[in-house]
Image (cartoon, grey):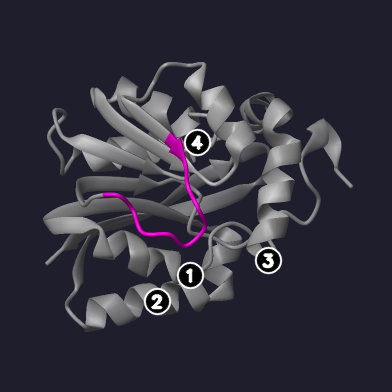
Amino acid sequence: MTDDNSTPANLWTPRPVEETIDVYRDWAGAYDADLETYGYHTPTRLAAALARHVAPETTVLDFGCGTGISGAALLQQGFNHLHGTDVTAEMVDIARGKSLYEKLWVGEPGADLPRSYDAIVAVGVVSLGAAPPETLSLLIAHLSPGGVLALSFNDPTVENGSYDAVLEGHVAAADVTVLSREHGPHLEAKEMGSDVIVLRRE
């Protein structure tokens, strides 16, 4: 069942990863148009936050790249060396048609990444109804020492608390330092915000 503009109902709710892939597979064709209608601000905000800490020539992994909306925002900030991965093949197919990424592949849920990166972004990915909280640990593990991870927690994710619990555990263990955390608009038409968080691996 979907609501207006074909957006999946109950999007921000926990579900098995197989169901999440089904949700985004079915949504892929309408995804870009729906998010444009809703006023999707987080990709632009997150790319700008990353640019304050990472040189534009850095290779950036766009984890959970979807159809490439986040990749386009990164390019607008001057990042020209982008890799992208997503677990939904239909989303990756759309992203591939936009020619945003030097490397682009369909990933397996929970699988290790092929290499470490100096910069990783996860726009709306490590969040309620998408990737589970432990995905944050996977991304931190694949950051180079001193590398930067920029991600977002939307309002339902912050309210849930389980994602922040994983983040707080890594901060307490001195695995990462929080460089910035700023709340702002996420989906304007739904009056939903998000925290854009920038972390450095120690």
Q: Quadrant of residue 180?
A: bottom left
Question: Which mark is first along the chain, 3 or 1?
Answer: 3
Q: Which residues are magenta?
A: 105-114
Residue 16 numbered tag = 3
Q: What separation in Å lies between label 1 and label 2 (alpha carbons)?
A: 7 Å
Question: Disc 2 marks which amino acid?
Answer: Val
Give x and y (percent) for residue 170.
28, 76
Q: Residue at x 52, y 67 (%)?
A: 158
Q: What separation in Å lies between label 3 and label 2 (alpha carbons)?
A: 19 Å
Residue 166 numbered tag = 2
Question: Which mark is first along the chain, 2 or 3?
Answer: 3
Q: Are marks 1 and 2 in contact (CB under 8 Å)?
A: yes
Q: Residue at x 27, y 53 (%)?
A: 149
Question: Disc 4 marks which amino acid?
Answer: His
Give x and y (percent) for residue 117.
21, 48
User: Crowding at label 4, few (<14), some or many (≥20) Cα neighbours within 10 Å?
Assistant: some
Q: Which residue, given by chain and number where applicable, does mark 4 sit on?
A: 41
Check disc 2 and report its element: helix, strand or loop.
helix
Residue 135 sits inside the magenta stretch: no
Question: Disc 1 marks which amino acid?
Answer: Pro
Q: Nearer the viewer, mark 3 or mark 4?
A: 3
Q: Nearer the viewer, mark 1 or mark 3?
A: 3
Give the side of residue 26 with respect to residue 100, left or right: right
